[in-house]
Image (spheres, rainbow, N blue to C red):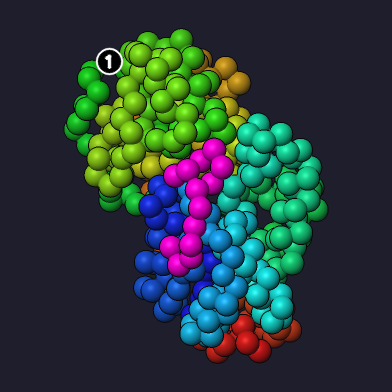
Amino acid sequence: MRILVATDAWRPQVNGVVRTYERLGEEASKLGAEITFITPSEFYTIPAPTYPEIRLAMPGFSWIRRRFSDVLPDAVHIATEGPVGWMARSHCLSKRIPFTTSFHTRFPEYLKPRFGVPASWTYSMMRSFHNAGCGVMVATPSLAAELSGRGFDRIMPWTRGVDTTMFRPRPVRRFGDDPVFITVGRVAVEKNISAFLDLPLPGRKVVVGDGPQRAELEARHKDVLFTGKMTGEDLAECYASADVFVMPSLTETFGIVQLEAMATGLPVAAFPVTGPIDLVQQNVTGVLSNDLAEAARQALTLDRGIIRDKALDYSWESATRLFLNNIESALFAKLGRRVPARRGVIRHAASA
């Protein structure tokens, strides 16, 4: 099965969406599926307003048409609601090509504080974007329930995995022996990092990541270590050098960083919101509370071995199989066919 994935989130961005699709491409090939990506790197781009690290693709509909013609995909998946996603969606609708989508990012909650755009307007646009497809994949049950209540149709579950070989307990202490509270992710207003920095906690706080708010927050919190962007073994060692992972975000749809922390044996302290409530087992793998400082202090007492064991349940192979099953069931439903009992190749269904 050849799948064409259109995504606005791609290297050099470092975030959960990029990591998800990079790993999806690797795992899918092991299961007999070939994934080809259309990314912003194929277009002329401009920096995103207030977020220059993210490049926005400029319209290139003729290029989109050529890419579809070259790949001849059996299925199409649109990962993001950015310019690349909208171009792919437009092409699919004009050619009556079935496609699926994913809901990865709460743009309504991001755009409101940055530009004052009412969340209801953005949700209306996103509902139109996703409901035009054969199905929208979401990462957690709580998010599925919320989107269903907002009028999103044909919602399908698609969880995530974690690399438990890279993210594992290690005998390292990069940040000293005092209790270390760490958060990992984009240093931007929507991640609510300031809520973590203002917590009255013992020991040391560490922020791993970069973003438009870093300079401001670093200047205001001289006692906090900002490491900048970390990847690979360096990132894994950062997790392993901490005692509690603090998740201050109120707008996650999943939060792969939580799984990475748990795979390292790190307990999670978070608000009881979408993402954490779907991944964290209360008082076992973490503590959820509206009092984030108290949650972080209580998390210090949890058993790291049990936390690691729970994280082993999340594999990228299982996540990829679920993605492929969603693709097949959504596509066959659109074409009015039954899914075969044994996985086969859907020959150019996108052009049927």
Name the residue nearer the viewer: 215 or 21.
215
Please state the horizontal and vertical placement of residue 108, each as a whole percent of the image: 68, 42
Please state the horizontal and vertical placement of residue 268, each as a whole percent of the image: 45, 30
State the image quarter where residue 112 is shown: top right
Please identify the residue farthest to the left as the structure is shown: 171
In magenta, the rendered stretch is: 41-53
Tell me the crowding category of disc 1: few under 14, some 14 to 19, or many 20 or more residues within 10 angstroms, Cα based: few
Residue 343 is covered by the magenta coloring? no
Instruction: Say if 352 sits above or below 278 in the image.
Output: below
Name the residue nearer the viewer: 150 or 276.
150
Task: Tell me if 26 is positioned left or right of 60 in this view.
Answer: left
Count of all numbered marks drawn on residues in the image: 1
Residue 314 can be seen, yes or no? no
Q: What residue type is labelled 1?
A: Asp
Q: Residue at x 59, y 65 (%)?
A: 59
Task: Tell me if 238 is positioned left or right of 334 in this view.
Answer: left
In the rendered image, which residue does mark 1 sit on?
178
The quadrant in which the C terminus is found is: bottom right
